[in-house]
Image (cartoon, coloured by chain):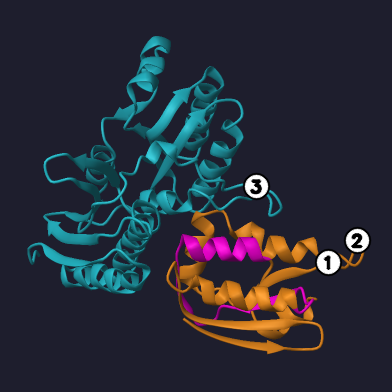
């Protein structure tokens, strides 16, 4: 099922947002995706376009947002192009998902939701065309097993961050996600306390017939695993797409 | 987005319909601001017909509840923003973003209003 790339170019202003969202939703449906997946696509495009309109562009710098959506086999691919200030996802703080109301900050949720809605999110700048490109893809078509979940992690995994990570993984498992892929592409630092918590979570999941897999390690993090011999203990995939493919093919 | 506001004796109810996103959120935040400015800090958001929410909308909800709670008559009596009716898709976003424990959510409007 493929209808080729669908493209929409609109001024980078908030008034364009609902049209960009509706276009992404409709293109997803046209390509055979169900309503829930189409909504996930829409939310990812919404968050991405909002970022471009509010941060890449400004009063002083206007420009267009170009949205390209297409299905290639089992991938639904979204590309957003702009000519504003390039975006560096590393400057976005990891979202606060656990603080109580009085200390909760709502920063970083947009980028976080893009990661939850899509399997892969990449930002780049093309010096030849002068365009920023955001490419997001999502595995569609072959239904993911009900018990598989992807949890993206950002920032440092150390003694301070470990309890929040444990909470998220346990809540995901309690909600039926026995097999969890931790996407570590946003993790810049892993301490020994971080390693211990990963090991503990892997054991907990295994005890309930589930498993913990890791993917998309940055070089510094991969080195920690190699040095400590933990590479043997965890199943580690190069990309999120490979991890998802592995868990999809091992089911009946 | 379509907003209807009703002021009862103690509680203000805002019925929020449609899409709460970057392009519509100001309408809701200025309505909430208006209620605070009138010296009222007990608000129920009826989300029964809210179809869609994204992160700028979430930010409005969090800021509103924080501001309301700053108003305090006594230790027992303080302002709050509570939610009536959380549709499945909105609940899904709440669950993903850790918002579910942040709000008192009621299954119907009467219950939410009576909770104050």
Q: Residue at x 38, y 41 (%)?
A: A89
For residue B15, above or below residue A35 = below
**In terms of image quadrants, where is residue B60?**
bottom right
User: What residue is shown with label 1?
Assistant: B78
Q: Secondary structure at mark 3?
A: loop
Among the chains, which one is orange? B
Q: Nearer the viewer, residue B66 or A222?
A: B66
Q: Nearer the viewer, residue A153 or A146?
A: A153
Q: Residue at x 31, y 69 (%)?
A: A21
User: What residue is shown with label 2?
Assistant: B75
The range drawn in magenta is B38-64
**Are dots 2 and 1 in contact, CB under 8 Å?**
yes
Q: Residue at x 53, y 34 (%)?
A: A204
For residue A218, above or below residue A183 = above
The chain letter for the residue carrying disc 3 is A
Relative to A209, A9 lies left or right: left
């Amino acid at each position: 099922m493929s209808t080729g790339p669908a493209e929409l170019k609109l001024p980078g202003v908030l008034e364009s947002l609902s049209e960009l969202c509706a276009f992404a939703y409709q293109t997803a449906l046209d390509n055979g995706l169900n309503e829930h997946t189409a909504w996930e696509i829409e939310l990812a495009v919404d968050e991405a376009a909002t970022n471009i309109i509010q941060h890449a562009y400004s009063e002083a710098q206007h420009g267009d947002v170009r949205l390209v959506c297409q299905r290639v086999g089992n991938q639904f691919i979204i590309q957003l192009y702009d000519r504003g200030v390039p975006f560096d996802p590393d400057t976005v703080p990891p979202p606060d998902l656990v603080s109580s109301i009085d200390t909760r900050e709502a920063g970083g949720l947009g980028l976080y939701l893009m990661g939850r809605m899509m399997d892969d999110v990449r930002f780049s700048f093309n010096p030849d065309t002068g365009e920023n490109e955001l490419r997001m893809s999502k595995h569609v078509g072959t239904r993911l097993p009900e018990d598989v979940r992807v949890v993206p992690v950002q920032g440092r995994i150390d003694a301070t961050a470990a309890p929040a990570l444990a909470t998220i993984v346990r809540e995901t498992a309690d909600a039926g996600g026995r097999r969890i892929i931790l996407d570590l592409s946003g993790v810049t630092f892993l301490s020994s306390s971080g390693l211990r918590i990963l090991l503990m979570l892997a054991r907990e999941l295994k005890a309930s017939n589930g498993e913990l897999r890791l993917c998309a390690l940055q070089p510094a993090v991969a080195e920690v695993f190699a040095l400590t011999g933990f590479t043997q203990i965890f199943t580690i995939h190069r990309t999120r797409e490979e991890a998802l493919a592995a868990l999809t093919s091992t089911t009946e | 987005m379509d907003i209807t506001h009703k002021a009862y004796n103690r509680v203000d109810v805002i019925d929020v319909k449609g899409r709460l996103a970057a392009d519509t959120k100001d309408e809701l935040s200025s309505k909430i601001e208006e209620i605070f400015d009138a010296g009222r800090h007990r608000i129920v958001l009826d989300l029964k017909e809210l179809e869609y929410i994204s992160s700028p909308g979430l930010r409005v909800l969090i800021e509103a509840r924080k501001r309301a709670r700053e108003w305090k008559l006594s230790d027992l009596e303080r302002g709050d923003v509570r939610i009536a009716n959380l549709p499945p898709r909105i609940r899904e976003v709440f669950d993903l973003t850790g918002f579910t424990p942040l709000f008192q959510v009621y299954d119907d409007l009467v219950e939410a209003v009576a909770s104050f």
